Amino acid sequence: MTKELLRAEKLVMAAGARTLCRNLDVAFEAGQLWGVLGCNGSGKTTLLHTLAGLAPAVSGRVIMGDRPLGAWSRRELACALGILLQHEEQAFWGSLADYVMLGRYARARSLLGPRAEDEQATADAIAAFELTAIATQPFSTLSGGERQRARLAQLWAQQPGLLLLDEPLQHLDLRHQLRTLKQVREAVQSTERAAVMVIHDLAYATRCDRILMLFGDGRHATGSAAELLQIDNLEALYGCRVRAFGNGADAHFMPVI
Amino acid sequence: MHSRVPGPLPMVVVLACVALGSIFIALLFGSFPVSAMQVFDSVFFPIPGIVHDVIWRLRLPRALAAFVCGGLLATSGVLLQVLLRNPLADPYILGVSGGAALGALCAMLLGAGLAGLNLAALAGALAAIAIVFMLSFQAGDWNLHRLLLTGVVLSSGFAALISLILVLAPQAQLKGMLFWLMGDLTHAGASTPAWVLLAVLLMVFVSWSRGLNVLALGAIKARALGVAAGGLQAAIYFGAALATVAAVLLGGSIGFVGLMVPHALRLFGIHDHRWLLPASALVGGSFVVLADTFARTVMSPQQLPVGVFTALIGVPVLLLLLSRRS
């Protein structure tokens, strides 16, 4: 039996007067890689923030393990669930390694600085995203893609069970897009972990196990990638005409120009 | 990566020595001539006499008051710069000193004694803290822009009322009021409570320094990494406000320390709050002790307000540091 990590019940989300999502019921189970699809402003980021307990839902609840999110302390929650934010503060004073080390906040308790275990987790996370050569560089001198990888490495150092990734591939070159997806897939392979990623690239969406579509008007759909990644769904989702090449996991979707 | 543990420790040790040196200088200089040998003798082998009295009754209490004042202001500056994520944040930005000054000036206008004056300043500062907090902390969440604007707007209101009092005040009280407003340690009372507060604040916030480091990235990011950001922000606000109140009660509004000292240390590469907090307290304390020694000796026996010298020394030093690093 698979282990359920996080469950949303009758979740209603809104942005101002606009209802983004009505009565969403979804459960994220260990071993699953979820792709969240939707057009701009359809509530993908709001959903991730709500699932991470960073934004309140209009109604409904989010349950992690046996308790609603509100009953968890921030520190406990950060060990169980981590989020890659789409936007964050650009300024940071220290080196890339210092930045990644901040991911250990919830796990390290010592006042005397990081323990060997924290150093190891940080070094592993930095290596996982091929940042070892520039680990001692000041964060402020990094390029956009390098910063994105540093944020991912910080989340990897945090080692949460559930990874919520808001556009993990933004700013990344092709090689690092693939490498990041490989890291996500490897993380999810363990029996305790799952990942939910907001993604715009349909070539990568076909590699997800489960898909959540947000139509932006309150409607939503969940299902396997094979069920949901169909021309009519995608045309309704993005409001443009789509053509498919190939079948199943090898299907490629292109907009009709 | 194992070089992090020693970190800027040697620098903090050097700063502690500088702090002791600054207090020694404060004991050495003044209108009554005392030699360095006599200071040593008086500190380590106290013999009753006029030298002993000058050092133990006059100069040491004043130096300790100056030090704790500077330490509290610099600590408050570090904390508010994290809270507001704004490099212009200083201990006075949230209206605490304006409220205290208004209270103090009203007390002076009514002819209250030193105790009444301190009480009125305390009441004014606490009122300002409470108003700003209630207006900006709603439903367990901060709006930092609202916090900053509320503080700045309130400060402007206090400034207007202070100008009004200065215009209306009788000539005889004007000088005392201006000294208070510019920062002056002449009437500094016992500094023991302020020392206790400084020690407690440093212990608490150095032990929470990892949280401060994360919070500098923003509240949402801090929550995502496991920091209870709302509670920490409230603690920072009240910690910084209390530090400012204690400093203002001892020495009036001594400007520039809380703004300059943390920035100067950051320009020297100390960013981690574990080191930045104690280093700021040491530098802020030494700086005010030296400025105060200068203020009371340069035109001796006439004593000048220390706040003038903190700015006169601080402005060129910070400008030099800024241009050197760019």
Image (tube, coloured by chain):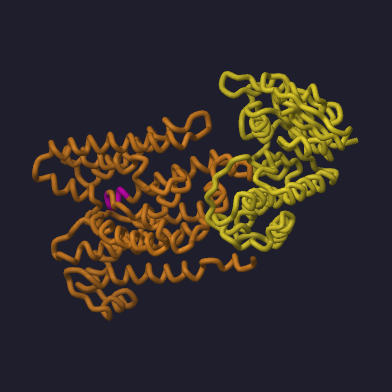
Chain colours: A yellow, B orange
Q: Which residue is drawn at 29% across and 41% down?
A: B98
**Could you tell whether B93 is left or right of A204 in the image?**
left
Q: Nearer the viewer, residue B1 or B44?
A: B1
Q: Which residue lies furthest to the bottom in this view?
A: B37
| Range of residues picked out in magenta | B248-252
Check the picture and name the quadrant holding the N terminus of chain A: top right
Q: Which of A160 and B51 is in front in this view?
A: A160
Q: Residue A200: x, y in percent? A: 71, 35
Q: Residue at x 42, y 49 (%)?
A: B87
Q: Residue B139: x, y in percent? A: 52, 29
- Rendered image quadrant of residue A88: top right
Q: Residue A52: x, y in percent? A: 67, 36
- Rendered image quadrant of residue A197: top right
| Residue A106 in sight in this render | no
Check the picture and name the quadrant holding the C terminus of chain A: top right
| Residue B189 is a magenta residue | no
**Could you tell whether B8 is left or right of A175 in the image?**
left
Q: Nearer the viewer, residue B153 or B114?
A: B153
Q: Residue at x 17, y 60 (%)?
A: B303
Q: Which residue is drawn at 87% across and 36% down?
A: A249
Q: Nearer the viewer, residue B235 or A152?
A: A152
